[in-house]
Image (tube, rainbow, N blue to C red):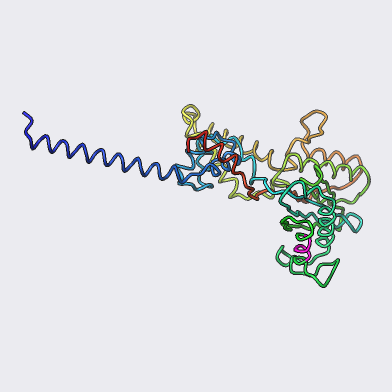
Amino acid sequence: MWTARSRLSLKNSQQKTLKHKEHLQIDLEDIQMAITAAQVKELREMTGAGMMDCKKALTQTEGDMDKAVEWLREKGLATAQKKAGRIAAEGICKTLVADGDQKAVVVEVNSETDFVAKNEKFQNYVAEVAAQALNTTASDIDAFLAEPWAADTTKTVNEALAAQIAVIGENMHIRRFQQVCEENGFVASYIHMGGKIGVLVDVETDVVNDAVKEMAKNLAMQVAALKPQYTSRNEISDEYIEHEKSILMAQIMNDPKESQKPQKVIEGIVNGRINKELKEICLLDQVYVKAEDGKQIVSKYVEQVAKENNAKINVKGFVRYETGEGIEKRQENFAEEVAKQMGM
């Protein structure tokens, strides 16, 4: 028999349970609301993972972008880190080579619109910035902006920039520069798509002729196209290798089939995947884009040219600038579109 007291007790219990569920639902909604469409888009661009997977990763990691990338990789949902940052700002990169090709510089100057970036007045100004950067002794951008402007020493570089902004009528900034000097060889340069990408390649060699210069130019084009992160495996730290191995191991352990394989087999899989990754991110290990057999790697191409020209050639390094890389650009329309699709 249900008494009045027991009915009241049951009702109170049901109300408490309902309030508890509502509280949990509110907490979950708060977390989800904190994840913006722009964050989801950024994570998607970085990893290549699906939109809903990116949203889930950010929710699971409370919006921490780095942890979300790790979460996706461990789950095997990140196909690749497609972009180191969002390419958004306009402007151009400019290279300048001097002193018998033994000294060079690459600079990036940004503008608000692509229209201004294509303007002759803006491009002439960037050329002046490159000339200044080629001979500067500044070690960073702040020191560079504070030094006298070579074209008018009554102004600093920063004051000359402000004057250009007033003339062109659009916000601009000198973002970065890097010099490369090679006394025992030369520096090759390459500009892609009118300044979207600027590349310098440092080549140490005892023979400088047209064939060796052509090789260096081909390598610069390779760097522009395939975006390696390192010149060779020697530049990669043991910590990086161990970190990547831990990610790959987590992916295998999250796979019902692969996780059942013997430990020795799993270690072989991890090492194989590490080697594959290194071949993609190290310039000298990449497949040479112009290889006739489609298999020759860059280091073998360099050895071939060295042998044909009786030369000793060492590719010491490279610099690759891509206009706007890592700078966030306003993308309200796309964010709104993503938000509508996700019901956010």
In the displayed structure image, the side of residue 318 where residue 120 appears, left or right: right
Between 71 and 111, the residue placed more toward the observer is: 111
Between 244 and 2, the residue placed more toward the observer is: 2
Callout count: 0
Q: Residue furthest right?
A: 209
At x 66%, y 40%, the residue is: 278
In this view, 7 is above or below 171? above
To which quarter of the image does residue 215 belong?
Answer: top right
Q: Residue furthest bottom?
A: 154
Taken as a whole, is the magenta stretch helix, strand or loop? Answer: helix
To which quarter of the image does residue 105 belong?
Answer: bottom right
In the displayed structure image, the side of residue 326 where residue 119 appears, left or right: right
17 falls in the magenta region: no
In this view, 273 is above or below 61? above
What is the x, y in percent for residue 72? 52, 38
Q: Quadrant of the N terminus?
A: top left
To which quarter of the image does residue 100 belong?
Answer: bottom right
Q: Residue furthest top?
A: 257
What is the x, y in percent for residue 239? 58, 50
In this view, 220 is above or below 96? above
Q: Report the span colored magenta.
A: 160-164
Between 240 and 44, the residue placed more toward the observer is: 44
What is the x, y in percent for residue 223? 76, 43
Between 156 and 113, the residue placed more toward the observer is: 113
161 falls in the magenta region: yes
What is the x, y in percent for residue 156? 77, 69
